[in-house]
Amino acid sequence: AGGDSLAAVELLQRVERALGARTRVSVLLEAPTPRQFTAALGLARLGADDGRDAAIVVREGAEGRTPLWLLAGAGGVLLVFAPLVEHLDPDLPVVGVEYPGTRGERLPFETVEEIAEYYIRALRAAQPEGPYRLLGYSLGGLVAVDVARRLRAEGQAVEYIGAIEAGLAG
């Protein structure tokens, strides 16, 4: 249990540095799922129930700047990006999309294309027009490539596509 307590404290310190959200360890116990935890931290949700509610404002940043969109992988949550976000320009707006199914229910999608469609609905609900900057983690990296391809096919500008641990090499 000591290791778990230390990990919880470290997680909360990273969240505070990256997102400016200060909280107690007890919040992790009271809000154990990613959705409950982000709600407890007061992170804003955008959109409606048809997939567009997946967009979460991670950091407001400076008005008028193009946001960086974080795309979590299957079973992934935005907290995996916390160490990165703490090193980004504080004026850079950061918005993320969590993969549905992070609360333990059956994962709703079977293909990258289905996930990309879900993520595009989330992006377009919060930011109807480009340019877009996309960064995916794990499966989210593969999805970011497909999202960018689809957005460009719709005539939208995509300024950046990045992937972390996405297995794109080869």
Image: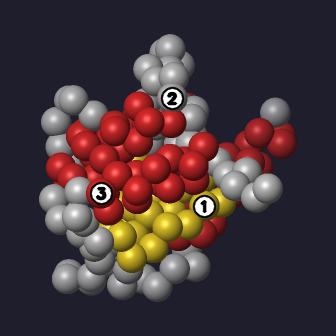
| Horizontal relation, residue 123 to residue 145: left or right | left
Q: What residue did someone put label 1 on?
A: 163
Most distant residue in the top direction: 106
Whichever of callouts 2 and 1 sits on the residue coming sooner in the sequence is: 2
As displayed, is residue 28 above or below residue 135? Answer: above
Q: What residue did someone put label 2 on?
A: 111
**Residue 57 in view:** no
Closer to the camera: disc 2 or disc 1? 2
As displayed, is residue 84 above or below residue 54? Answer: below
Q: Position of residue 40 (x, y in %)?
A: 37, 43
Residue found at x 16% / y 36%: 48
Q: Quadrant of the N terminus?
A: top right
Whichever of callouts 3 and 1 sits on the residue coming sooner in the sequence is: 3
| Horizontal relation, residue 163 to residue 1: left or right | left
| Horizontal relation, residue 119 to residue 10: left or right | left
Give the class, few, some or many, for how many residues have Cα within 10 Å of label 2's Cα (few <14, many ≥20): few
The label shown at residue 153 is: 3
Residue found at x 50% / y 14%: 106
